Image (cartoon, rainbow, N blue to C red):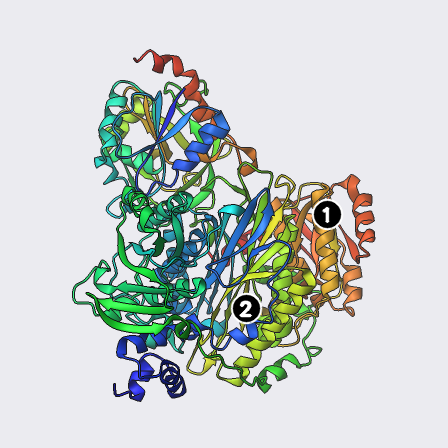
């Protein structure tokens, strides 16, 4: 399966995603510069973390205008698996490919820590084969990760089971203490209606080796391999 | 030109120095030239006071690939790789505008590393502030921590270690020392040496503005609050990220002759230093420098300290390739001049000469050897008799108890959990962090594609250095080395940042010279070279200097990164103290916090014992015998035990009678006294014989303290406190 990692000026998680796919999954992967428009050679896309364009306006607000984003949109609309991580999640919400927005953390400060998230939806290509209720330990590192959506959107997301990851304690309970940024309903990640586009604030691409604190991230990144059949049938 | 004292004061040159310039130049300098001399002959750029003393430092060793004199030092770490390291102060700007001051400090030190062709892998910060009870100090503390996080997080380089200390002596003069470590292939290391007359000089990155003019000069005078306003630079980490990637790509292409970042004294120092290293001249035309504002004079362009700029030397035939790389990263690259063979730094404006000075005159600042004399007040503090300090009470009626003292120490901002700081720093990015902040005495990073690991840390106990700068500096070196040894790494190289007051005062000059001597002796004894460094003098306000602070930044190497140790106790195991049982209250955190006394002599230090303790700990970790290791520093043995228990979420029952006996029956010294060369280690219950054999092999003193288990820390009959209470106290100190 061929992975693309989209690099914007200011992306800084691109290399980690590259390493996770190469070293952790052993799959072919390329960095794709933001000016490229042809994504036809890829089976799935990762929009990595970082501070695209410095995030000086609003996280992800400028990246969505990059030339590559039209192709990302087409890829997503064709059902291709897309994963937005951290700043990548912010870019996908700014681009309207995912609902909601990411606001400044409730603590008003950057938060770097290992947290627990629970898989609440196993129908996306990035969570297939992970039983609902599976608890993953992943790092977070963000200043603007507080998930917000209006009441109607939130209600719909919950009703349709589109909350993919939720911050929980080590035993899988949704508690205020387990919520690192003040996200509504402890939401750590959501998907689009079709389920092929997933965004999350935690960093699965930084958790691919026990030596660096854990390898639960590989369970997310490798899920798409099992979903590979579905992606291949797209073309 | 009519030179008045006011003009000289503006460029911070003395009348003698002005006469020297006239004599060496054979004429009077024009205003542009005078400004350039002022910047280059400042302490910050010219090391006028520290250079003669710095000669004393050991800078060579089998691992050294690049010693002092370049943008950063480099040591061989095996497998064809080098670690590149440098620390630098940004004290004066941070005193005025803490957020931007600290942020641009990080930006500057990171540029020093990638200029060498190394990929930056870690940022560290050594910080000093006045007590947090004062609102101004809280503002400085939060601003500095915020600025470091903002810049480093955006840049995508993990901030993994450092140290922070609070003392009233830093109230008007906080210290911000930023360190960066990078990794490069040994054969790809680049030097900032301009060569080849006819080669082109490019200026890359940010446009040049009026920010920071005279920053280098003002970093070399007293009272930052008054002098520094208006010269603080503003950082742009996004631009720096582009610059970082573009410069590494350009260096990798092999089309770059030399690269130099623009830091203090901007274009003046970067052109002069690259030319001096290569033994050539450089001619630039300021009209070709891209500006961010109109109407700038040649003087302003030459002395601007606008951030995120690089000077790049390329052969004319390679220009197109290099320009294309910078263009791809959406960066300006303007050809502003060329390398010449005449050894002159020539500045033109639209082709008209505005300054013309031999490079050597600029880089060869005069040096001063002064007469130092210890301040008698400090000698009196050191010689103070501490036997009058009452010992701890065995019950509350008898005065302060051991339990109360331990909780107070755990709450002390100098000891408490650093999590409120490091949680705001991205320390997992780049996926190399094996031991993150808080889990070991140093941070450990892996190097992908190898079995190697790096351990990094900064250290300096300013209270020790105040009371005895010679001994205190030795402790700073020893503790830094001990910290990397406690995670299993062999100390490989040091980068130092000398933060002192005004060296023109005999008391401060004494501190500076004694501290350098102490560092030199300790580095020689422990076999660790100093490969780079920085001096920040004139850290004083209203005639009061900061405590002498020779910050030590250290890099250690693990041949097998999987064989490392953290400081957390496992739930089952036996704990030993390696090193002397005897400790002192002199210069201790206990004495300062609970008796309000900064007095007494710091602990004595036996460097040979120190070396053997560190070797034994490393061997124990490498052989898998030692499961956890933790240095005993501020707060003494009881605090170190508490920290390892809190980290491991396990209690323990430990014997203290032998310690009390070794400390003349005093409980305070036994529990909270400080000493060098002491490490707590934990071994599995079946491994005690192996540990003892190892320690006997090194002829080391040791004590079996007891076993971990339960959920309370019990120290003989002196104290028993639940883990929850310990954790609550320890977590609240900086929260």
Residue B321 or residue B15, whichever sits in front = B321
| Residue hosting label 2 | B550
Name which residue lies at 61% across and 81% down.
B381
Image coordinates of residue B401 in percent, x first then y, are 66, 65
Residue B32 picture quarter: bottom left
Numbered badge on residue A191:
none
Q: Is the residue A142 above or below the residue B100 in the image?
A: above
Horizontally, is B193 left or right of A56 in the view? Answer: right
Image coordinates of residue B647 in percent, x first then y, are 59, 47
Label 1 Cα crowd, 10 Å radius (few <14 / some 14-19 / many 20+): some
Kindly identify which chain the residue marked by label 1 belongs to.
Answer: B
Q: Is the residue B528 above or below the residue B29 in the image?
A: above
Residue B328 or residue B661, whichever sits in front = B328
Label pair 1/2, CB-CB below 8 angstroms? no
Horizontally, is B119 left or right of A58 in the view? Answer: right
The CA span between labels 1 and 2 is: 29 Å
User: Is residue A103 at all visible to an observer of this figure?
Assistant: yes
Kindly identify which chain the residue marked by label 2 belongs to.
Answer: B
Secondary-structure class at tag 2: strand
Numbered badge on residue B619:
1
Image coordinates of residue B673 in percent, x first then y, are 68, 66
Q: Earlier in the sequence, mark 1 or mark 2?
A: 2
Label 2 Cα crowd, 10 Å radius (few <14 / some 14-19 / many 20+): many
Q: Is the residue A155 above or below the residue B34 in the image?
A: above
User: Is residue B595 at all visible to an observer of this figure?
Assistant: no
């Amino acid at each position: 399966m061929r992975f693309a990692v989209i690099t914007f000026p200011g992306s800084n998680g691109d290399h980690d995603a590259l390493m996770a796919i190469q070293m952790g999954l052993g799959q072919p992967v390329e960095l794709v510069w933001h000016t490229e428009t042809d994504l036809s050679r890829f089976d799935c896309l990762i929009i990595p973390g970082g501070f695209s364009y410095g995030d000086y306006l609003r996280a992800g607000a400028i990246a969505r205008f990059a030339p590559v984003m039209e192709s990302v949109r087409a890829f997503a609309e064709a059902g291709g698996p897309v994963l937005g991580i951290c700043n990548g999640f912010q870019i996908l919400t700014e681009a309207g490919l995912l609902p909601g927005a990411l606001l400044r953390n409730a603590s008003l400060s950057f938060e770097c820590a290992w947290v627990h998230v629970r898989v609440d939806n196993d129908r996306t290509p990035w969570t297939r084969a992970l039983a609902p209720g599976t608890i993953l330990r992943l790092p977070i590192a963000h200043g603007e990760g507080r998930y917000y959506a209006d009441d109607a959107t939130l209600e719909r997301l919950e009703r349709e089971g589109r909350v993919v990851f939720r911050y929980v304690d080590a035993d899988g309970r949704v508690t205020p203490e387990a919520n690192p940024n003040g996200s509504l309903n402890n939401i750590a990640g959501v998907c689009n209606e079709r389920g092929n586009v997933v965004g999350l604030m935690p960093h699965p691409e930084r958790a691919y080796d026990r030596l660096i604190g854990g390898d639960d991230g590989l369970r997310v990144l490798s899920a798409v391999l099992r979903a590979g059949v579905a992606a291949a049938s797209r073309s | 030109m009519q030179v008045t004292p006011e003009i000289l004061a503006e460029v911070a040159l003395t009348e003698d120095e002005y006469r020297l310039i006239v004599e060496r130049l054979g004429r009077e300098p024009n205003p542009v030239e005078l400004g350039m001399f002022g910047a280059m002959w400042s302490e910050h750029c010219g090391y006028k006071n520290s250079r003669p003393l710095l000669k004393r430092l050991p800078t060579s060793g089998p691992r050294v690939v690049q010693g002092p004199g370049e943008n950063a030092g480099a040591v061989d770490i095996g497998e064809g790789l080098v670690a590149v390291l440098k620390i630098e102060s940004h004290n004066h700007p941070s005193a005025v505008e803490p957020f931007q001051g600290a942020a641009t400090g990080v930006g500057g030190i990171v540029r020093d590393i990638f200029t060498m062709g190394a990929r930056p892998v870690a940022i560290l910060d050594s910080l000093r502030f006045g007590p947090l009870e004062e609102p101004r100090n809280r503002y400085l503390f939060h601003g500095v921590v915020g600025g470091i996080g903002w810049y480093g997080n955006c840049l995508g380089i993990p901030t993994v270690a450092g140290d922070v200390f609070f003392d009233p002596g830093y109230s008007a003069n906080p210290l911000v020392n930023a360190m960066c470590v990078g990794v490069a292939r040994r054969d790809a290391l680049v030097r900032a040496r301009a060569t080849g007359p006819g080669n082109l000089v490019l200026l890359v990155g940010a446009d040049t503005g009026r920010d920071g003019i005279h920053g280098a000069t003002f970093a070399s005078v007293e009272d930052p609050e008054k002098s520094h306003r208006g010269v603080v630079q503003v950082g742009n980490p996004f631009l720096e990220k582009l610059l970082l990637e573009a410069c590494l790509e350009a260096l990798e292409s092999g089309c770059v002759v030399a690269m130099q970042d623009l830091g203090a004294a901007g274009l003046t120092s970067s052109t002069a230093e690259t030319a001096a290293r290569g033994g050539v001249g450089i001619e630039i035309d300021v009209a070709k420098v891209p500006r961010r504002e109109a109407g700038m004079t040649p003087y302003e362009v030459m002395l601007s300290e606008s951030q995120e700029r690089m000077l790049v030397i390329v052969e004319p035939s390679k220009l197109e390739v290099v320009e294309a790389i910078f263009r791809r990263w959406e960066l300006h690259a303007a050809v502003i001049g060329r390398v010449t063979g005449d050894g002159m730094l020539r500045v033109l404006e639209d082709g008209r000469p505005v300054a013309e000075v031999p490079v050597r005159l600029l880089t060869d600042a005069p040096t001063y050897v002064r007469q130092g004399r210890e301040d008698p007040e400090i000698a009196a503090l050191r010689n103070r008799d501490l036997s009058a300090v009452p010992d701890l009470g065995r019950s509350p009626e008898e005065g302060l108890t051991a339990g109360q003292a331990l909780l107070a120490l755990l709450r002390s901002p100098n000891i408490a959990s650093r999590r409120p700081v490091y949680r705001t720093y991205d320390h997992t990015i780049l996926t190399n962090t094996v031991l993150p902040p808080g889990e070991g005495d140093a941070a450990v990073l892996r190097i992908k594609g190898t079995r190697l690991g790096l351990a990094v840390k900064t250290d300096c106990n300013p209270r020790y250095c105040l009371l005895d700068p010679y001994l205190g500096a030795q402790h700073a070196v020893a503790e830094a080395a001990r910290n990397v040894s406690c995670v299993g790494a062999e100390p490989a190289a040091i980068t130092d940042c000398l933060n002192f007051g005004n060296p023109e005062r005999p008391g401060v000059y004494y501190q500076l010279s004694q501290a350098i001597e102490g560092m030199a002796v300790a580095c020689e004894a422990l076999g660790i070279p100093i490969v780079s460094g920085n001096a920040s003098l004139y850290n004083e306000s209203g005639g009061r200097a900061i405590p002498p602070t020779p910050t030590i930044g250290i890099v250690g190497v693990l041949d097998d990164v999987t064989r490392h140790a953290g400081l957390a106790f496992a739930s089952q195991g036996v704990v030993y103290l390696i090193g002397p049982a005897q400790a002192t209250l002199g210069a201790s955190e206990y004495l300062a916090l609970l008796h309000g006394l900064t007095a007494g002599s710091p602990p004595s230090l036996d460097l040979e014992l120190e070396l053997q303790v560190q070797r034994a700990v490393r061997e124990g970790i490498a052989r898998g015998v030692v499961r956890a290791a933790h240095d005993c520093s501020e707060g003494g043995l009881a605090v170190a035990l508490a920290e390892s228990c809190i980290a491991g979420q396990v209690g323990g029952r430990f014997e203290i009678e032998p310690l009390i006996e070794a400390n003349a029956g005093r409980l305070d010294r036994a529990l909270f006294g400080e000493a060098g060369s002491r490490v707590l280690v934990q071994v599995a219950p079946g491994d005690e014989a192996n540990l003892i054999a190892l320690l006997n092999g090194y002829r080391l003193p040791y004590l079996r303290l007891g076993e971990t288990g339960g959920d309370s820390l019990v120290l003989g009959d002196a104290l028993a406190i639940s883990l929850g209470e310990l954790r609550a106290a320890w977590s609240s100190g900086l929260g």
